[in-house]
Amino acid sequence: MSESSSTEALVEILRTEIARLAPGDRLPSSRELTGRHGVSPVTVSRAFAQLSAEGEVVTRPGSGTYVAPRRTRSSTDTPDTSWQAVALAGRDFDPGAADGLSDTPPTGGITMAGGYLHPSLRPERALSAALARAARRPGAWDRAPAAGLAPLRAVFARAAGSTVGPEDVLITGGGQGALSMLFRALAAPGSPVLVESPTYPGALAAARGAGLRPVAVPMDGDGVRPDLLADAFAVTGARLLYCQPTFHNPTGAVLAPARRRQVVDVARAAGAFLIEDDFARHLGHGGPVPLPLVADDRDGTVVQLTSLTKPASPSLRIGAVIARGPVMRRLQGMRQVDDFFIARPLQEAALELVSTPAWDRHLRALSAHLRERCAVLTGALARELPDWTPTRIPEGGLHLWAQLPPGLKDSAVADAARTHGVAVNAGARYFPAEQPGACLRLGFAAAENLTDLTEGIRRLGTAARACAGG
């Protein structure tokens, strides 16, 4: 019999014996157990160690091993964590509605919520091959430079435009953590931060987590309105703007060419930073994708945030911040405080992935798939719910933003949809202030296939009619 199986057998014997004893009773000694059961002292030691780790026995050096006090649960000994309310006072954290139950469908349901690709759309074979090659690279498990691997920084710099160099790039662990870092770096707690309305709920959560006050700036079909943006800077004294100029989440809007320079100029005139969340650069549907705002900004007004997570995999937590001037030095200093550096094997894997022809093939295929899925979803919505109004047919991104007819509440429809086996995102969580109308965000990238998209809209129609009393 092997040592491990002998240990397991002895543990079970001792459990039976412990059950007959009272707390505080002494168990047989190691010498007694070895003689009684024909096992080695090592086996006895391991058995006692396992029972001790489980809280069944207490070993007292020089005295022996004893039955531990019985642990019972009752209303009188329920853990009391109420003291934490006092200890945490003054350090409030309000993430807002960053997450919701409606995001996750019941078992067997259809997902039209969330912001990641279905596994069938991910380059999983290329990811696996990249990770395997990365692990074999010389120095793959060494400490990485604080700013990130130089070749990977060069990749992000080239994607941002000819005015950006590798020295302007800081590699980050995905986009969300970088966004939290930027909010902490660029504004003091209690300060206002201007945001498009609607906007990404994760940005609202990160801003509030940094102690900032999101202030809504309305947008239209061409993106955030520069006139109202200027007014918001003047009224609030804000020194920070967060925006998504390309394939905005949730609306899919692209900031109009005439406004791109205006928005940057308004921020510069206010002496403010502009965080450009460029999460969807690789999620176009086949048409031209405008250069990022940072490409035309030499004065450090724009701080760009981008990531490989959305077009690749939720677990490829590799992104980049592009910044110029003292703010980059501040971000590098925060890196030394927060996490020292991003895991080198993951950086090496990202570099392997984006440096192969397989990455370009994946992006082309993904573009075609997203375009097809968007068309199927839009067509199904027109057939099943013709009185719902998409704000636009997006030319990139993962979502369709739909306005509901009067009389319907987005939260009620989202909850009803979940009971019918489909998850969608209620629109209220995307607004930093008052919601002007009921909307839903309908994702077309997380569902398994096209059939699920049409079936999901059919179920959504059933849920909506139930909410309307029809």
Image (cartoon, rainbow, N blue to C red):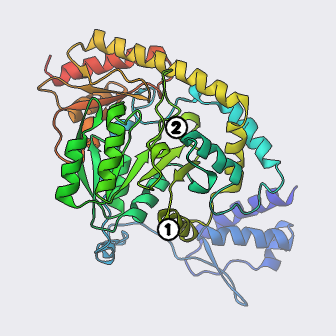
Q: Report crowding for label 2: few under 14, some 14 to 19, many 20 or more residues within 10 A (C-alpha).
A: many
* Residue at position x 51%, y 72% in the image: 70
The image position of residue 201, as x and y in percent, is 34, 45
For marks 2 and 1, the one nearer the N-term is 2
Q: Hey, what amino acid is under mark 1?
A: Arg
Q: Which of 388 and 186 is in front in this view?
A: 186
The image position of residue 167, as x and y in percent, is 61, 56
The image position of residue 465, as x and y in percent, is 20, 18
Q: In this view, does 204 lie above or below 160?
A: below
Farthest residue, direction bottom: 62
Secondary structure under tag 1 reads helix
Secondary structure under tag 2 reads helix
- How many marks on residues? 2
Left or right: residue 125 versus residue 78 is right
| Residue holding disc 2 | 310
Q: In which quarter of the image is the N terminus?
A: bottom right
